[in-house]
Image (spheres, rainbow, N blue to C red):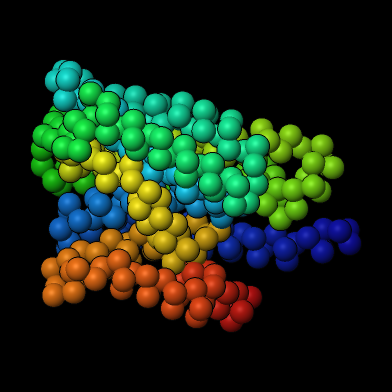
């Protein structure tokens, strides 16, 4: 009886927390559904694709504690494979092109992960960077990528062979659905026993090993899931802009996703989304201003200020304030 009385307040607080979280998710979905009537759909699609890319990277860095400098390789792989298939086979529907592109990124993630997870810390980061640079030079020379010109005019096609994606509004809702699926995968992984083991590995890997967990297997699975979601973002981005280029494979892109994640809040679910929205919005605004040539410098300054002012990122600091004042 004493146990029941002790657990009841805890269960009640958990129930209320779940209700608040579900209401917040529902509000965000409603905002996402109404957003294309307020803002330019193509801009919103760019934000969503990069937000998915950042969420994929955050799964690896924020929850497994693995800093990858080579995630651009997966973004580019998904984009190039999808772009090539849709350009070469006009009858192929976009969802199949995205699935194949994502599958290619998963296979590449298995190959990269099998090599990279043997190292830790800066050595892991350098291995992923080296492998990504190999893919960058491969894509320059490969005949199906168009080299430095890239792939242009990739058709959007018809979803399931029925719904035309030529309309930006229809394309937006397709991208929004893909983002929700990707975000749900990350959210489920983080709150599952698998996610708890990843956190244990991040905090104290020797202890996780002593408890009997196959640490390398968990790291590899996290790496592959992250690579697949990054490939999903790249495939979707190619269809949105009807373009696949070397920009997605360059190491600058790997640095950009790190910037997005750290600005928003590493180790938080919504941090990468906020970070991606902030970076893409700043790039868009600065590109149309006299400061267009100083975009990277300004982003670097903002990054330094954020790191010095609030090391947990924007969402991380907001979460701390919420817990301090309301719990």
- Residue 233, given in percent of the width and then of the height, sits at 34, 42
Nearer to me, 298 or 44: 298
Quadrant position of residue 259: bottom left
Q: Position of residue 33 (x, y in %)?
A: 26, 53
**Residue 35 found in image quarter:** bottom left
The N terminus sits in image quarter = bottom right
Q: Position of residue 28 (x, y in %)?
A: 36, 59
Vertically, is 70 above or below 141? below
Residue 111 visible in the current orientation: yes
Q: Position of residue 133 (x, y in %)?
A: 40, 40
Q: Is residue 322 visible?
A: no
Q: Residue at x 23, y 24 (%)?
A: 144
In the rendered structure, the answer to whether residue 111 lies left or right of residue 272 reads right
Residue at 79%, 41% (x, y): give it.
209
Q: Residue at x 23, y 29 (%)?
A: 145
Rendered-image quadrant of the C terminus: bottom right
The answer to whether residue 106 is above or below residue 322 is: above
Which of the two residues, 183 or 104, is positioned nearer the viewer here? 104
Image point (21%, 46%), residue name: 172
Left or right side of 154 for 81? right
Residue 104 in which image quadrant: top left
Q: On the rendered structure, is 166 left or right of 28?
A: left
Q: How many marks?
A: 0
Comparing 34 with 264, the one in front is 264
């Amino acid at each position: 009886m004493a146990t029941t009385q002790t657990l009841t307040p805890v269960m009640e607080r958990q129930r209320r927390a779940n209700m608040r979280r579900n209401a917040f998710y529902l509000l965000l979905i409603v905002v996402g559904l109404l957003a294309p009537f307020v803002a330019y759909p193509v801009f919103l699609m760019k934000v969503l694709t990069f937000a998915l890319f950042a969420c994929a990277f955050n799964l690896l860095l924020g929850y497994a504690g693995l800093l990858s400098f080579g995630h651009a390789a997966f973004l580019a792989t998904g984009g190039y494979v999808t772009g090539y298939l849709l350009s070469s086979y006009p009858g192929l529907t976009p969802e199949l092109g995205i699935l194949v592109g994502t599958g290619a990124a998963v296979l590449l993630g298995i190959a990269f992960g099998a090599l990279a997870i043997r190292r830790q810390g800066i050595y892991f980061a350098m291995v992923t960077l080296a492998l990504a640079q190999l893919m960058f030079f491969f894509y320059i020379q490969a005949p199906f990528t168009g080299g430095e010109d890239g792939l242009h005019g990739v058709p959007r096609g018809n979803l399931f062979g029925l719904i035309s994606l030529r309309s930006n509004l229809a394309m937006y809702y397709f991208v929004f659905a893909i983002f929700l699926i990707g975000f749900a995968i990350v959210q489920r992984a983080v709150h599952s026993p698998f996610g708890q083991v990843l956190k244990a590995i991040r905090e104290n890997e020797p202890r996780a090993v002593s408890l009997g967990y196959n640490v390398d297997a968990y790291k590899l699975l996290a790496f592959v899931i992250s690579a697949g979601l990054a490939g999903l973002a790249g495939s979707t981005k190619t269809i949105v802009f009807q373009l696949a280029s070397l920009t997605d494979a360059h190491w600058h892109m790997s640095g950009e996703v790190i910037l997005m994640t750290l600005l928003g809040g590493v180790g938080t679910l919504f941090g990468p989304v906020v970070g991606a929205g902030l970076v893409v919005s700043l790039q868009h605004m600065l590109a149309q201003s006299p400061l267009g040539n100083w975009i990277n410098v300004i982003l670097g300054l903002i990054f330094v200020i954020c790191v010095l002012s609030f090391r947990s990122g924007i969402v991380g600091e907001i979460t701390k304030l919420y817990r301090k004042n309301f719990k």
